Structures are given as structure tokens and as C-alpha cells.
Amino acid sequence: MLFIVAALLVLGMVLGAVAHVPVPVSLAATALIGAWLVVFAARERLARRRQQH
């Protein structure tokens, strides 16, 4: 539960910061975070497949 509260607090701070930066910077950060999430998901999926075999 504490993790969820902390995550929401950080999300609020990040969204507040995004409101004050130019759109291209915001889009670049969004692309970077999205790419990181895709890489993370792929690594987790591969790790789970290795554990099953």
C-alpha cells in the first residue's frame, strides 16, 4: 500500500514538471520511458521463459 501511495506521489510530481517543459522535450522523455518499458518487459518475459524450461 505504501508503494502505491509513493508511486502516485511521484506521478503527480512528474506530471507537474511536464506541464512546464516544452512539448518536444516532453515527447522525447515519453519515448525514452516507453522504450525502457518495452526493454524491461522483454527481459522479464525472457527470464520467465528460461525459468519454465
Image (tube, helix red, strand yellow):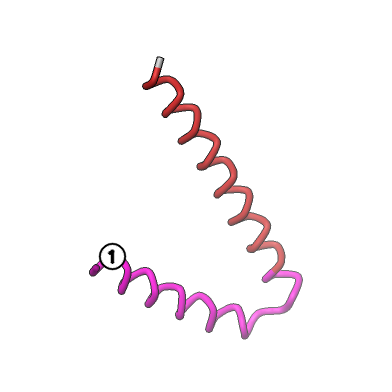
Q: Which residue lies furthest to the front in this view?
A: 52
Residue in view at x 70 percent, y 69 percent: 25
Q: Is residue 34 toward the left or the right of residue 44 in the image?
A: right
Q: Is mark 1 on a helix, strand or loop?
A: helix
Q: Farthest residue in the top direction?
A: 53
Q: Is residue 6 magenta?
A: yes
Taking the spot 72% from the left edge, 78% from the top edge, the residue there is: 22
Above/below status of 16 relative to 46: below
Nearer to us in this view, 44 or 31: 44
Residue 3 point in image, percent of width and height: 28, 65
In this view, the residue farthest toward the right is 24
x, y (%) of residue 52? 39, 20
Query: Is 24 on the left or on the right of 13, as rendered?
Result: right
What span is colored magenta in the figure? 1-26
Between 22 and 51, the residue placed more toward the observer is 51
Q: What residue type is labelled 1?
A: Phe
52 within the magenta span: no
9 displayed left or right of 25: left
Q: Is 22 displayed left or right of 38 in the figure?
A: right
Residue at 57% over, 40% down: 39
Q: Which residue lies under the disc numbered 1?
A: 3
Q: Is residue 8 above or below residue 35?
A: below
Q: Quadrant of residue 28?
A: bottom right
